[in-house]
Amino acid sequence: MKFSAAGGWFGGDWYQNVERGAKYGFGAVEQLGWSHLDLARAKETLEKTGVTSTCIIIQSAAHPEYAEAMAWTHGMVWEDTHDIFVESFRETVEAAKIMNVPNICATVGNTRSDVCEEKQFENCVKTLKSMAHIAEEEGKMIVLEPLNVLVNHMGYFLVTTKQAVEMIRAVDSPNCKILFDIYHQQISEGNVIRNATENIELIGHFHIGDNPGRNEPGTGEINYDKVFRAIRDKGYDRYLAFECGRTVPLPELSVNMHALIDRYDEK
């Protein structure tokens, strides 16, 4: 298991967050947005610090107008976004290659009221399959994220682990897996350890945040020692990324999180 710090912990711009992450001893920092970056500078910053950028989200720097179509208010559930997603994914893959990012996050959009859920599911699978062919050729991993609809993302189409598993199995690609966000899934369905471990072969990335509050582990109800132990014992060897806020000053947070992850991190 490998861990990635949340870029938002460090309070700077993208480049500063990488540098500050390195200063506080984190070998990886996750910041999903990339379309605003000077990619040459980003690559140089990562190489200079030895930090890994673990995941970016599908965006287009060349076509910022695509953002509306790919947003949660529209998304993959609509037929008219297929080509936009595929083109944007190709561009995101090129950015990921420059920055040596292993994972690309995909979201599907909010549930439509004009067609049945089966049709929306089919639209998502069609787009993911098209992107998965590219991911296979380029050696990148698509990580598809379910989100909670009770607190943060009302109306989102893909909510439960069961739905995500069905979608990933329908795509049927080794380069398309689930982004299992422990915070979201605790809110949506609980049963985090069982849902994660029983589907571990379909999970390509984890996000970490406690509940309630979406802050660092130890601030809420989730027993992260038991969660991490269960995931590790299943042989998971990819990244778990903190995607959460912090409640204490950065030096204290760093000490606390290193004390936690040092029990599980691969050195």
Image: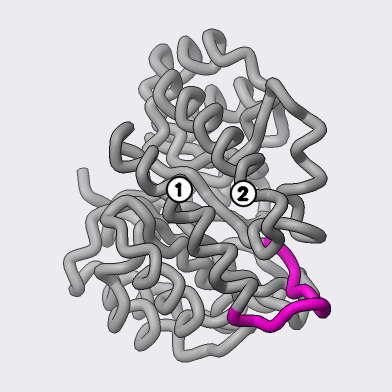
Q: Position of residue 234 (x, y in %)?
A: 20, 73
**Quarter of the image where the C terminus is located:** top left
Q: Residue at x 63, y 57 (%)?
A: 244
Q: Residues within 10 Å of mark 1 (few under 14, many from 20)?
A: some
- Give the amino acid at mark 1: Ser
Q: Is residue 66 above or below residue 23?
A: below
The residue segment tinted magenta is 109-118
The answer to which quarter of the image holds residue 225 is bottom left
Q: Is residue 168 left or right of residue 247?
A: left
The colour scheme is: one colour
Give 113 or 93, whichever is nearer the viewer.
Answer: 113
Q: Which residue is mark 2?
A: 82
Magenta includes 194?
A: no
Give 80 or 111, whichever is nearer the viewer.
Answer: 80
Q: Residues within 10 Å of mark 2 (few under 14, many from 20)?
A: many
Q: Residue at x 37, y 83 (%)?
A: 193
Dominant secondary structure, magenta: loop
User: Can residue 240 be seen from the camera position used here?
Assistant: yes
**Quarter of the image where the N terminus is located:** bottom left
**In the rendering, which numbered label is found on residue 259?**
none
Q: Residue at x 23, y 55 (%)?
A: 237
**In the rendering, which numbered label is found on residue 130?**
1
- Give the amino acid at mark 2: His
Q: Is residue 235 left or right of residue 162?
A: left
Name the secondary structure under disc 1: helix
User: Marks 2 and 1: in contact by CB < 8 Å?
Assistant: yes
Name the secondary structure under disc 2: helix
